[in-house]
Amino acid sequence: MNKFLAYIQKPVHIAPLAMFRVLFGGMMFFSILRFASKGWIYDLYVKPSYFFTYMGFSWVKPLGEVGMYLVFIALALSFLFVMLGYFYRIASVSAFVLFTYVELIDKSNYLNHYYFISIVSFLLCFLPAHRYFSFDVWRKPSLKVSHVPFWMTAAIKLQLGMVYFFAGVAKINHDWLFNAMPLRLWLPPRQDMPIIGTLFTYTWVAYFFSWFGCIYDLTIPFFLCFKKTRTWAYVFVILFHVLTGMLFYIGMFPYIMIVSTLVFFNADFHLKIIAWFNKLFRINSKEIYLPLEERYSILRNFLLLFFSIQIVLPFRYAAYSGKLFWHEEGFRFSWRVMLMEKGGYAIFKVKDKDSGRNWEVRNYDFLTPVQEKMMSTQPDMILQFTHFLAEKYHKKGMPNVEIKVECYVTLNGSPSRLLINPEVDLTKVNESFKKRDWVLPFEE
Amino acid sequence: MRALLGIFIVALLSCTSCKPKDKEEEKEFDLKGMLANVGDNIIVPAYQNFKSTVDILSVAADTFNNNPTTPHLLSLRVAFKNAYINWQKCDVFEFGPAMDNALRANFNVYPTDTTKITTNVSSGSFNIDVLSNSDAKGFPAIDFLLYGDNQSDAYILSTFTTHTHAANKKQYLLALIAGIKSKTDATVSAWGTYITTFKTSLGYSVGSSAGLLVNAMNSYYERYLRDGKVGIPVGIRSLGIALPRQTEAFYGKFSAELLNASLQSFQNLYLGKYGSTNGLGLDDHLVAYDGAAIDENLRNYLADAVVSCNTLSDPLSQQIINNQTSVEAVYSKLQKVIIPLKVDMPSKLGILISYQDNDGD
């Protein structure tokens, strides 16, 4: 243990960490601008009349039109200041808090890559990434540090590596490897893509991509770690992300990963870029050895715990029997990225026991198309919506309604089948961590 | 690592330059052919037919305006009904030019607001292009003007001839019809050039023609055909309370006829059928993409729904009151179509069902 602590305590140059701060902050600044320019602030956080909150976070509410625009302005500025390393402590905390707040508003918008950004922003709150190559140092030169304990840069690398590795582990399943699903469904429609498009009509290409993707995800963190393989591994990183970026609607994620993985390169690489930058702006910067004086032991131990939890979290699905992709218990926060093609349609059948009237709900009256689409394949959201409806009818003077759900779902091209037991009155069911017995099993 | 990269690049290049002749190729479909068939033989003719019925309607309205007699009222009603029926064959194509001209919101918002119409008529000053008048114009408003709420032909005629606001009412009628005509003309002429875009925007991504078409079909079928024409008036999609006055063409009493025209043309669109020719359609696409079972379901369910809708009689509002269960049975046939249409088909063809743009992961 002592040996291990000594190893991770060893001083390394701060340049990769500082550069990561610049690149990550910059990419996020542009991501937020892109998000705003697409009108998504309105579409996702102002327009909906109902929001699917996370368990335990039902108190998180959007702030209305003006409020949400202000939040996003503050968020964009926070990431900009993180990039510049200007008032970094405040900026990094505000970036993390605001971004996470926005993500907690509605689980319809959950994406693994948003979760990734929340976590990285969280790490950046604690790491002294602003103590080199930053406006804070320029403002207050005594802040400058040249070396930090190895675990500080390693934390970022570990986080990135985990995203890949767990994404790879998740791909080790029968559908992905032996049926080339869902790539077999996703690739043929992209045959109009230039140059390689014609390839996508062939089944073997889907198999090739599946296996390649799995091996890539499992091995790339290691190839990036070793000096000998690093350059070539990075070529693969670019190739892989550019390709997936062209094939799928995944927004900024590929580009964020491409620049983030530069943190694996050694200090010399980053120092060269910084030197070039300094020369460009005629900044005089002397390289002297200035180790971080504080030991940050509490933070170090906290991060050890934090990563231990993260390593266990993706495996919590094992506590639930049945097909994970079908019931999705333990699916989120586990780096299961682009793994399944799922589509559904949910019919909410209401019976007012007092009047004896029966009807079906017009979901589109309450939900946006994206919300409805997301809900239609995810049991926890279906249950939430049922409770929302029951409350709504209660307020309208119908306290005794029964709501049953007929929900048809297709998974990886399977014929659509019932997801929820259509005989169960979901108003009587409460959400918990227990196995959901009202979700029907997926029979092959 | 170097070797891996080499293999990867060589594999990619060797496959792009030559086409393996083995039986590995699976999913090939003439999407271009399907879009050409749907565009040239279904969409454009549908709009042209609609335009000619609107032209006839416009002429009939002028004739009636110059000489408001019972025979002219009756022939105006015939022209109106004909145009309304032909609109049913275009309504589904709410993308491209139709979207630009907001045809659906301008032509067919019902139930129409009769109070608003009466106010507009009696004031004599109105602007039918403002948003607040969207439920006081289009076919449903004309329906109310020409038929009234269960009134005799003689009475209706008198509202255009001797009543206090007769002149205003004629003016309102003409303005509504002129509104339909100008938007129809604009759409038909826009399709003159848009057809090329439609036929060449290949692929299945959100803005592609296949993506637009399948999304338009889904939202139309779900909200306007199934719910609007049957589900809401019969009560299934309105808290279990029947709303017979919310049927389409409630005043003219030809709701079932409109529904049949709409569903029939929807079925033809799916099949790629025009006249008696069955061209390339989504059915063929599904079969080519290993979805013969989905196609079979869709074809059967659509055929069942067509048969079932044919059993309805006009006035539909009356049938809802007298025999609600018979209309509910029709609804359940319509409902069956939505699952393969909205769940299985898009998934099989790789089309994102998204009336809204966003990222995935």
Image (spheres, coloured by chain):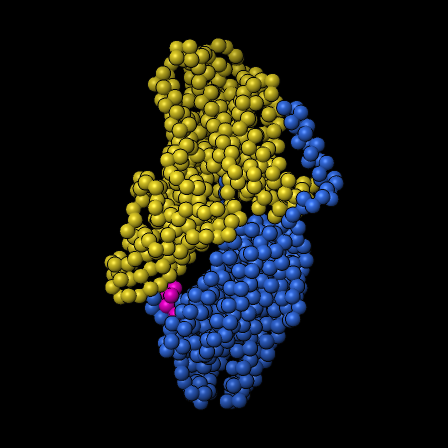
Chain colours: A yellow, B blue
Q: Where is residue A113 in the image (x, y as percent from the top left)?
A: 47, 36
Q: Name the foreground residue: A402 vs A106.
A: A402
Q: Which residue is drawn at 42% across and 13% down?
A: A4
Image height of B320 relative to A117, above or below: below
Q: Name the foreground residue: A371 vs B270.
A: B270
Q: Residue at x 44, y 15 (%)?
A: A8
Q: Is residue B33 magenta?
A: no
The stretch in magenta equals B234-238
Q: Where is residue A288 in the image (x, y as percent from the top left)?
A: 50, 10
Write down the quadrant of residue A390 in the picture.
bottom left
For residue B312, say whether it is visible: yes
Q: Where is residue A426 in the image (x, y as percent from the top left)?
A: 32, 52
Write down the quadrant of residue A129 in the picture.
top left
Q: Residue at x 63, y 24 (%)?
A: B1
Q: In this view, does A57 lie to the left or right of A187?
A: left
Image height of A399 relative to A339, above or below: below
Image height of A272 relative to A94, above or below: above
Q: Which is the main secondary structure of the residues drawn in magenta?
A: loop
Write down the quadrant of residue B9 in the picture.
top right
Q: Which residue is drawn at 40% across and 78% down?
A: B318
Q: Name the foreground residue: A134 vs A28.
A: A28
Image height of A244 relative to B62, above or below: above
**Picture mark count:** 0
Q: Does the magenta stretch include residue B237?
A: yes
Q: Position of residue A391 (x, y in %)?
A: 28, 54
For residue B138, say whether it is visible: no
